[in-house]
Image (tube, rainbow, N blue to C red):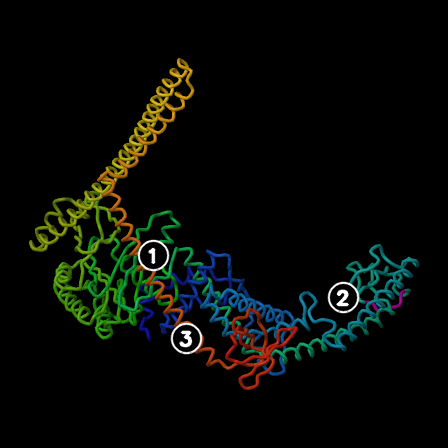
Amino acid sequence: MNTNISNKTLQDLEFTTVLQQVAEHCITGLGKKRVLSTVPIISKKELLKELKLVDEYLSSYESENIIPNHGFDDITESVNRIKIENSFIEPEAFLKLASTSLIVNQHIKFFKKFKIHFPVFFTVSQKIEFTTYINDEIKNIVEIGTGVKNNASPVLKQIRKDINHVRGRIGASFNSALSKSIAAGFLDDIKETVVDNHRVLAVKAMYRKKVSGSLLGSSKSGSIVYIAPQATLSYSREYQNLVYEEKQEIVNILRDLTTIIRPMVFVLEQYIEYLVHIDAIGAKAKYAKEINAILPKISTEKRIYFKNALHPVLWRKNNEQKLLTIPQTIELNNKQQIIVISGPNAGGKSIALKTVGLLQIMLQSGILIPVGEHSETYIFKNILTDIGDNQSIENQLSTYSYRLKNMRSFLRMCNEETLFLIDEFGTGSDPELGGALAEIFLEEFYNNGAFGIITTHYSNLKVLANELDNVTNANMQFDEGSLEPLYKLLIGQAGSSFTFEVAQKNGIPFSVINKAKKRVETDKIRLDKTISKLQKERNRLHKNSDSLEKQKAKGQEHLDSLQEKEFKIQAKLAGFQELYDSNQKMLSLGRKLNELLNKYFQTNNKKEFTANFNKWIEEEKVKRAKKILEKAGSKSQKKKAKIVEKQMQQVIEKVEKEVLKKVVQVRKNKKVIAAKVIKQRAEYVYKINDRVRVLESDSVGTIDSIDKQKVTINYGFFTTKTTIDKLELVEAIK
């Protein structure tokens, strides 16, 4: 799907400011450059992939699986130099290439390990070639700190051995000359110094002919001359020759290494592109975390539903100043195709309009947006804007002329795949004529099936919005008491401009306002008054509704508290009653037992006591049995038992039906999966070294040979033979 979103639209909606804020989170210069050049993505497939990548990166902050570092040095220049035949780059540049290769390889391994958590990243990373060749070849020749290694070539190894040997002789010969000169008293107090990278003797001027060597300079006063000993000079010449040979050999080694790496240039370019992309993705994710952004549902049906949407630029500015930003909930659908927002100036109309446009542009550019859960939107082909005073001095166009020119392009491009946003629709001309023309434009956009938001002060547009089926009025709420904007969008009602009220608040004399009212047509004043009254009534009802809801909530809380107290009291009473009954029963039993004992003490007849006691026990058993039967046999209890039993039976039957359905579905799914497995198994062509398992066996082996339908499987310590139809694939050889 191709998109038609102009630079003017991006400029109108302050998209560049968003990109600058995102770019702040980049860790490389190339990544920052990539972010700042971001434009809406043409392909819907690529857009969805980009959004999912950002969403996956954002999710890594909430898990233990942190994405590895992707910081890298810019190797673009080095890669371009490698492309040139017979060229070479410095050791430090080679180390940067190796580091880049290592970072990308770490990413490939990481996303392969956590492909379940990062499925889109895994897909992207698997398209990148995994190779240690670049790193291995460079590390064989170059190392950090020392540059080219001694063993990079036999020639270099020998030259450096000779250099060390000559360096030792230079030191020994100079020390010998120094000792002799000190003993002879030819040297100044400083004894030695360095001139032109040569150790020299600080000889007193009067003894300069006494010391053999080359004169390399003198002090400012001329009292000291600097002489390089003769023996040292001969070794120094040999040393310089060896250093030159070392440099030449290093160049040869680096040129050979460059030749080795040259075929891997396309891989390095692939690595650069990947890391730059990851840096841009990471910056978008960090920005999303900062502004509490999410990935809304991308709808296939034409609909915009932004719940608690925030303008990110305004939110950031207000947040820095510790000010509150009022979120807006806006919906466009087939039954609410166009919204006409009205209300007083500085009430937030333009911000509401720009919020929708900017969030839509951000999302279509692969940037997550600050909206609430369950938000969703559609990917539009065209996004058109007409915002602000675009008076052109260069083109000698007035504001109105420019807007008419803009409307011409709107009429040409507006269709069912278009989202349009027009701020202060119809302004810049005669209110009557401009308003009439604005009506026609609105009807054209409506008939073409375009979605859009319009802000206006024109009463005729408010009336038209009320007449058209899928066009809805809306207003920015206004506190009629304080005459302060509330910055809350209310859908379903046109808004008053509160022109005279605001003028009065700002100190305009009432007499002047009254004169202005008389010059305005009565119908317009009546309409504005009606709208104002409706808006005030709506606000009053809203406040009353809120108050009633609060009272209802308080009443419910009080009722719940009383019910809880009643329950506790009833529980205590039941406990007391149970305790009382128990005590009474115990007292009765105690009295009966006391009677039996007194009679026994009087008669001393043990048999009679035993007989009476057993008789009493039997009577108590009968009484208890009757009570149990009465309790169980009461009509109410029986009725309740039947009802409970019936209810339980119904529940059991319902559960059985649901379980049976699930069992049937599971069986169907298993059959489908089994069929797929059988099909895959039948279609798969086994290869040598495939890891397989014999059916109904846990042991995994490797295929050694295949002879028609017979295969030999190696288990390490032993081999076995079987047929292909008895095999189960564990891992295919790559």
* Mark 3 or mark 1: whose residue is earlier in sequence: 1
Up the image or down, 594 lies above or below 231; here it is above
Q: Are marks 3 and 1 in contact (CB under 8 Å)?
A: no
Q: Nearer the viewer, residue 381 or 508?
A: 381
What residue sits right under mark 2 in the picture? 197
Residue drawn at 17 percent across, 45 percent down: 541
Q: Is residue 212 magenta?
A: yes
Query: Residue at 83% across / 62% down in the picture?
Result: 225
What's the mark number on residue 373?
A: 1
The numbered disc on residue 675 is: 3
Q: Residue furthest right?
A: 184
Q: Upstream in the sequence, badge 1 or badge 2?
A: 2
- Bin the neighbour count of mark 3 within 10 Å (Cα to Cα): few under 14, some 14-19, many 20 and up: few
Residue 486 is situated, as x and y percent measured from the top left of the image, at 25, 48
Q: What amino acid is found at the position of numbered circle 2 in the picture?
A: Asn
Magenta-colored span: 211-215
- 186 or 513, which is in the foreground? 513
Q: Is residue 194 left or right of residue 391?
A: right
Q: Are marks 2 and 3 in contact (CB under 8 Å)?
A: no
Which labelled disc corresponds to residue 402? Answer: none
| Up/down of 125 relative to 184, above or below | below
Q: Quadrant of the C terminus?
A: bottom right
Closer to the eye: label 2 or 3: 3
Magenta run includes residue 552: no
How much space separates mark 1 and mark 2, taking CA atoms? Answer: 71 Å
How packed is label 2: few (under 14 Cα within 10 Å), some, or many (20 or more)? few
Kind of element beneath mark 1? loop
Q: Residue at x 87, y 66 (%)?
A: 173
SS under mark 3: helix
